């Protein structure tokens, strides 16, 4: 129950920040872009026109990054369609941003409850961020399955990997490894990583459904 409350509080804060970015920052940047467009139409000097066009490109890039941040904070597809579609959307972004070929293998017999779904998605999100930043991989696969009253996940890439000695002394920049482990264990699950230099990396974890979610599922089964 405590984990459920923590997840809810975190996600509510993420939603608040996302709302502020969407309703305030992006709107302001869009207004700046429109004013630059109007200024460009009024200019005739080639050098000034070139400068304004560069500014417009910078504003467009800033807006694109803000929209990407919105997705990271709370992808709408996670609530609307579920875990597998949300992971698939994340992999599509990786393909566009890092030319990384990704696929989802969905073996879940049922959709996890809302709290579990968010926890699992956040761990996967961190694993994919590590792949993008550190692995130098060309392909990554996310395997999802329902297992022992929870959700089991394996994220596998074909990147450069790392040794057990590197993992033991903490790889620079891989703070996400600790964050993934802590998030899974706080939820009552487990997390592990297997890797060898030149042989890619497998991140695997299991997160149980919360007691409240299990009770709701049992009630729903009885009612049906």
Image (spheres, rainbow, N blue to C red):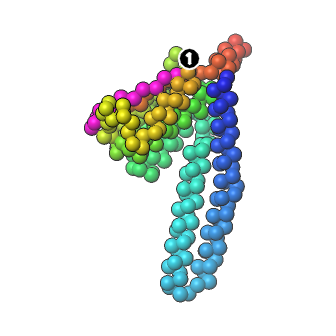
Q: Which residues are magenta?
A: 189-201
User: In which quadrant is the C terminus drawn?
Assistant: top right
- For image coordinates 69% across by 39% down, the residue present is 12
Judge whether residue 110 can be spotted in this image.
Answer: no
- For image coordinates 50% across by 39% down, the residue present is 125
Q: Which residue is mark 1?
A: 149
As drawn, the residue found furthest toward the top would be 222
Which image quadrant for residue 112? Answer: top right
As drawn, the residue found furthest toward the bottom would be 45
- For image coordinates 51% across by 73% down, the residue present is 54
On the image, the x and y values in percent for residue 202 come to 38, 31
Q: Which of 68 and 3 lies nearest the eye of the viewer?
A: 3
Of helix, strand and loop, which one carries label 1? loop
Note whether 187 is above or below 197 in the view shown: above
In the shown orientation, is residue 107 left or right of residue 80? left
On the image, the x and y values in percent for residue 217 come to 66, 18
All told, the count of numbered labels is 1
Note whether 131 is above or below 2 in the view shown: below
As drawn, the residue found furthest toward the front would be 169
Local crowd size for mark 1, using a 10 Å CA cut-off: few (<14), some (14–19), many (≥20)? few
């Amino acid at each position: 129950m405590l984990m459920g409350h923590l997840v809810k509080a975190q996600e509510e804060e993420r939603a608040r920040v996302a709302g502020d970015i969407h309703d305030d920052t992006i709107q302001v940047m869009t207004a700046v872009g429109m004013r630059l467009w109007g200024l460009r139409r009024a200019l005739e000097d080639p050098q000034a026109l070139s400068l304004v066009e560069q500014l417009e490109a910078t504003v467009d890039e800033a807006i694109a990054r803000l929209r990407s941040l919105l997705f990271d904070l709370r992808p709408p597809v996670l609530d609307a369609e579920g875990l597998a579609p949300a992971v698939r959307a994340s992999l599509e972004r990786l393909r566009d941003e890092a030319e990384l070929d990704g696929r989802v293998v969905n073996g879940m017999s049922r959709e996890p409850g809302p709290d579990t779904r968010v926890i699992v998605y956040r761990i996967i999100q961190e694993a994919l961020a590590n792949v993008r930043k550190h692995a130098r991989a060309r392909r990554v696969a996310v395997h999802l399955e329902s297992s022992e009253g929870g959700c089991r996940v394996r994220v596998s890439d074909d990147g450069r990997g790392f040794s057990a000695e590197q993992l033991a002394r903490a790889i620079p920049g891989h703070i996400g490894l600790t964050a993934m482990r802590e998030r899974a264990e706080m939820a009552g699950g487990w997390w592990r990583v297997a890797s060898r230099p030149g042989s890619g990396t497998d991140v695997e974890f299991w997160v149980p459904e919360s007691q409240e979610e299990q009770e709701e599922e049992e009630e729903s089964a009885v009612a049906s």
